[in-house]
Amino acid sequence: MTGDRFKIGCLEVEPVHVDHSVPGAYGFIIHTTEGAVIYTGDLRLHGNNPRMTMDFVEKAKEARPVAMVSEGTRIDVPTDNSSEATVYDASVKITQGAKGLVIADFNFKDVDRFRTFYKIAKERGRKMVISFKHACFLERYASDRKLNVPDSRDGNIMLLKPKRLTGTYADEDYTDKYIKSRLDYQNIITAEEIRKSQKDYLVVLNFWYFNSLVDLKPENGTYIHSLSEPFNEEMEASFGRMKNWLDHFKLAFRQAHCSGHAPASDLKQVIEGISPKVLLPIHTEHPEMFEGFAAKMKVENVTFGRRFIIE
């Protein structure tokens, strides 16, 4: 639950695990001569391990903090009933109705989401196809038994071999070490092989690798977007380009996602549970929405270059 304390100058820092969409997420209790300062990091209560976040809340409260730096990514979202279970349920229904290739796009660092789609692929009799880069992540995750994920050479996982240089699959085309060192794996598959029996596969395909669709040539395909919807101009532009690819290959678009960040109702529970004297919201466009969360708590707006004195 709690990692070893470490020192930074005169400060003593105590990490405590929290639940987030990637493994190894921590909040921090920073012990100073003027009292404890809390930093939440990114956290949530609606994931698979809410107890981890509540462990942090309890430890932070015990420290009687004089100040707390809190994330506020989704403070403008009142509440959220989505969870990894709802992602699973929605994706199962989508996959059950799919007649051809199923493509899933999610953050591969999200171990919970990987487990969700791995489970669905296995239950629906489909092989899960991942990239060689994904294999690097998976092999590291599999080395930690606590994460409970399979290795990249698992019987239900295939590695999609990309085309390089000559546009063929010649071994000499592969100079990247992460590919070259895995060319002897027995579970490698090509786009052409997938194309022959598309209903037997669930391909994990990030937008930046959509050029693989040229070789996959999906028919009656379904694309599950298991990521946040765009929330700025750059993301909207990328989302538009993605939709153009999907339209070109006549892939049905479906959304199934839950966030790695807590909505306002859960942030309120966390903040009131810890009950700091001063709250400093960060990573938010709406710091004013933190006002009134806890009695006797002062909210300070964080601005670049401003110095805060802890008393």
Image (cartoon, rainbow, N blue to C red):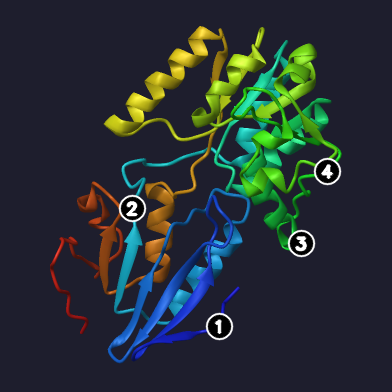
Q: Residues within 10 Å of mark 4 (few under 14, many from 20)?
A: few
- Mark 4, mark 2: which one is toward the viewer? 4
Q: Tell me the quarter of the picture where residue 271 sits.
A: bottom left
174 or 102, nearer to the observer: 174
Number of the front mark, 4 or 1 = 4
**First along the sequence among labels 1 and 3:** 1
Q: What element does badge 3 sit on? A: helix
Which residue is denoted by mark 2 in the rendering? 72
At label 1, counting other C-alpha atoms closer than 10 Å, the crowd grade (few under 14, some 14-19, many 20 or more) is few
Q: Quadrant of the C terminus?
A: bottom left
Q: Is residue 292 visible?
A: yes
Q: Please state which amino acid type lies under the numbered disc 1.
A: Asp
Toward which corner of the image does residue 219 lie, by quadrant?
top right
**Marks 3 and 2, how far apart in space?**
32 Å
**Dot 2 alpha-carbon crowd within 10 angstroms: few under 14, some 14 to 19, many 20 or more:** many
Whether the residues at callouts 3 and 4 have beta carbons within 8 Å, the answer is: no
Label 1 to label 2, Cα distance in Å? 27 Å
Secondary structure beneath disc 1?
loop
Q: In this view, does 303 lie to the left or right of 159?
A: left
Q: Which residue is drawn at 42% across and 62% down?
A: 41
Q: Nearer the viewer, residue 101 or 89?
A: 101
Q: Which quadrant, please, contains the N terminus? A: bottom right
Tag 2 or tag 3, which sits nearer the N-term? 2
Above or below for 282 versus 38: above
What is the x, y in percent for residue 162? 65, 30
Ranked by sequence position, the earlier of labels 4 and 2 is 2
Between the residue at mark 3 and the residue at mark 4, the CA separation in whole angstroms equals: 15 Å
Numbered label attached to residue 145: 3
Which residue does the numbered mark 4 point to in the structure image? 154
Residue at the disc numbered 1: 4
Amino acid type, residue under disc 4 in the picture? Asp
